[in-house]
Image (spheres, helix red, strand yellow):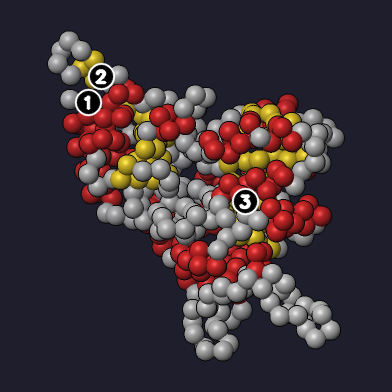
Amino acid sequence: MGPNKLKPESIAAQALGWVDEKTKSVVEPIYISTTFIRDPDNQYRSGRVYGRDQNPTYDQAEAVLTALEGGHASLLFASGMAAATAVFQALMPGDHVLAPKVMYWSLRNWLKNFATQWGLQIDFIDMNSPDAVRAAIKPGKTKLIWIETPANPLWTITDIALTCEIAHANGAIVAVDSTVATPVLSQPLKLGADIVMHAATKYLNGHSDVIAGTLTTREDNAYWQRVRTIRAQLGGVLGPFEAFLLTRGMRTLYPRVRTACASAQKIAEYFAGHALVAEVLYPGLPSFAGHAVAAKQMTGGFGGMMSIRVKGSTSDGSSTINGGAAAIATAACVQLWKRATSLGGVESLIEHRASVEGAGTPAPADLLRLSVGIEDADDLIADLEQALTKATK
């Protein structure tokens, strides 16, 4: 059976079924060579010149991701930030960009502090509002709309298909940060997006042991070739061992993500309306503002990411713990959840985002971001329950 007839679960599990031709190994080798032999007439008919951006270990990971996203081609980068910034670096000075107000804080800061210095015009808008997108577009000037959905750390949802329709009608391309959704739950290219980006450090690798980023394009064009050139010439490339580990991680992508989704749904439903929780932010809850759109464009679940807002409480009848202090105290009291930055690993993580992001964060002071791993959901609920109880009483 060819890859086109296989379900994505099978494509990922066998990493396209590649076998090393020399040894017949079912795991492709790691290539560490930095350079390649020229032909006697000084040509490179092998197609490889230098290992910086042409390492053979990239091939399988890029091919697997391209197949899962239904795209034309993929590129590996040294980090999610390297991948994301390449999309903007491929634009021209004076180009106008729309980005969401709620998005990964490091990229938001880069856009504010560096991209503008290169002549890009950036407007941050409520990307979950189609009317806001229409109003912010500058005809002839807007070249890129950047979407993150679900968007970290409030998990706001953007209608990908509708935003692409608006963008393309005005001559702009759309790039989607689909790190949280993963190819398991959403395929933005099939909804009209031009580029899909992943911080592959997170769910694609899934084991908190690789820093990596990826881009996948719907079609080959001049813009994609500029992105390729940026990767090669600026050197934001992945090491061969990390590329090997990423391929290994993607083999278990589907069972990991589905387990995390099921647990996150159970946790969200348990704490929705909880006496010590002011609000649960999770696209899988019908009460969540973006639930209907998420249900339309995400299949098989709503992701493993959620946030809770912790209520303050009266501790001794005279003094009150505010929500921010209660949230920090809750994170301090967990035992199974790990207090750490990142997401998408097999272990569940908890973090007070306002402390991390600092001034300008969209995260309320009482918000805790939760990355649900693959532990038993009841154990995770019990640990969060006892932590909330200790922190607020």
Q: Which residue is mark 1?
A: 392
Badge 3: how crowded within 10 Å, few (<14), some, or many (20+)? many
Q: Quadrant of the C terminus?
A: top left
Q: Which mark is residue 239?
A: none
- Residues 169 and 29: in front is 29
Q: Are marks 3 and 1 in contact (CB under 8 Å)?
A: no
2 or 1: tag closer to the N-terminus: 2
Q: Residue at x 56, y 75 (%)?
A: 31
Let me know if residue 158 appears in the view.
no
Q: Quadrant of the N terminus?
A: bottom right
Q: Is residue 203 above or below residue 96?
A: below
Three-letter amino acid code at the position of disc 2? Ile
Q: Are marks 2 and 1 in contact (CB under 8 Å)?
A: yes
Q: Position of residue 35 (x, y in %)?
A: 66, 73
Q: Residue at x 64, y 60 (%)?
A: 75
Let me know if residue 109 appears in the view.
yes
Q: Which residue is mark 2?
A: 321
Q: Is residue 241 above or below residue 307?
A: below
3 or 2: tag closer to the N-terminus: 3
**220 with respect to 188 (left or right):** right
**349 with respect to 142 (left or right):** left
Mark 2–mark 1 Cα distance, whole angstroms, equals 7 Å
Q: Which residue is mark 3?
A: 83
* Residue sticking out furthest to the left: 316
Three-letter amino acid code at the position of disc 1? Thr
